[in-house]
Amino acid sequence: MKKTVAIIIICTMFLTTFSCVGVYGQKSDIQSGFEIVLNGVKTDYNSVIHGQTHCVPMRGIFETMGASVFYRSRDHKILVLTRDGDIIEHIIGDVTMTMNGAEQVFEHPSVLENNEAYIPIDMVSEALCPDEISYDNRQLSIQKYLFMSDYHKMIQEVLDVCKDSNFYPEQFQRYINYHIKMPAYTVREAVFRVNLGLDYPFYENVTTIGQPYDLLVLVNKYNQLPSDFEQYNLVNMNRAYTASDAKQYLLAGVAYEKYIEMADAARNDGLSMRVVSTYRTENYQRSLYNNKVRATGKVNADNYSARPGFSEHQTGLAVDINSTRGSFEYTAEFRWLQQHAHEYGFILRYPKGKEWITGYSYEPWHYRYVGVDAAKIIYEEGITYEEYYAKYVSVNEFR
Ligand SMILES: [Zn+2]
């Protein structure tokens, strides 16, 4: 049953004639007191008056109301995650606020005072559900009743992990939806999976890669190379390191140097490594994929072959070594690669048991160049490139 908790916000003006100037050039001539009484427990806040408008500290108010507040300094953006599962977005100094993407415009902007965002009081009442709130402009008091339903308890479980470094507040609603859909997972597992994109089926919710020439580019079933992408820094491989057929084998310059170093080291250990596939154009990938679909059907083709635009072979950073048969796993070359590939910056890209993350069946022959530093971490932690990317490359700008 619903438990009702009453919150009463009472504003009283008890300080006067305090002068300060906000960064947006508005002069605030009165600073007054503002208090929140929550179940009999009183908290005092400052408020500032800009023009005729009372502005109250955004973080303090929302946190008192059970929400979590995040800030991105790059553009002064504030995200508020509410206990109702809503995302409120606001940029300090703006007159607009969005609730789950729907924009509302206010008469007065928010201001920054002493490194704190103060928002007009009507923004607070709008954000906190106007139908549930009683707001008295003359007395500057707000009353709201907070309901603690099972739904709120579930949201609270998500908010409980929101200060984890891998919690991206802009994905709040995806975390909630996935948590509802997959109740067997803990919230942290749900967050982890959403960060990998797994709340969507493969090839849904696809992002076009912004930095396709970056060495750490992530190309997978959620991240597509731009249609005009073409790797320019390609090296025609020395034939001593390639299969002996008529094809041309090209690799990106950085990957080429380290590949030769690695193949030479294996050769010194009495082994033979020759690439059987390296750089591919998008058109070539298209014909490979279409052939696979014709031969085995679409579902099967998707397990083994990338759709055009989604293959990391198109970056020139991936190699298939010696053969593309499962039996490669039982060769001395494979065992050598398992021990040493990371020393040269290469990783096994589609490991056994991680198909649910990578989207591909196990490929013991496919290696991706990511540089020595990344490869070492991936090797030591026994993680996929997707996990490495979510953990070390994605940037969480909200604090
Ligand atoms: Zn491959």
Image (spheres, rainbow, N blue to C red):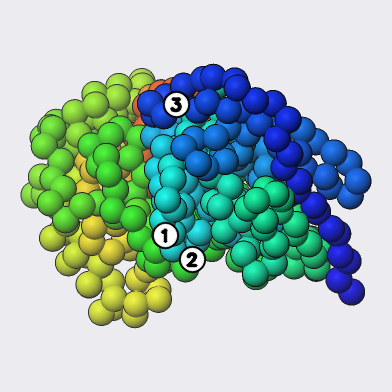
Quadrant in the rendering for residue 70? top right
Residue at disc 3, CB closer than 8 Å to ligand 1: no
Q: Secondary structure at mark 1?
A: strand
Quadrant in the rendering for residue 109? top left
Pointer 3 local density, CA inside 10 Å: few below 14, some 14–19, many at least 20: some
Q: Earlier in the sequence, mark 1 or mark 3?
A: 3
Q: Secondary structure at mark 3?
A: strand
- Looking at the rendered structure, the kind of residue marked 2 is Tyr
Measured in 3D between alpha carbons, the distance from the residue under mark 1 to the one under mark 3, in whole angstroms, is 27 Å
Residue at disc 2, CB closer than 8 Å to ligand 1: no
Q: Image point 25% across, 79% down: which residue?
A: 294
Q: Secondary structure at mark 2?
A: loop
Q: Are marks 2 and 3 in contact (CB under 8 Å)?
A: no
Q: Is residue 112 left or right of residue 164?
A: left
Measured in 3D between alpha carbons, the distance from the residue under mark 2 to the one under mark 3, in whole angstroms, is 49 Å
Q: Image point 85% across, 39% down: which residue?
A: 42
The residue wearing badge 2 is 200
Q: Image point 84% across, 58% down: which residue?
A: 6
The residue wearing badge 3 is 27
- Whole-percent x, y for residue 153 in the image: 79, 61
- Whole-percent x, y for residue 38 in the image: 84, 47
Which-is-in-front pick, marks 1 and 2?
A: 1
Q: Is residue 207 left or right of residue 387?
A: left
Q: Are marks 1 and 2 in contact (CB under 8 Å)?
A: no
Q: Earlier in the sequence, mark 2 or mark 3?
A: 3
The residue wearing badge 1 is 103
- Looking at the rendered structure, the kind of residue marked 1 is Glu
Q: Is residue 60 left or right of residue 318?
A: right
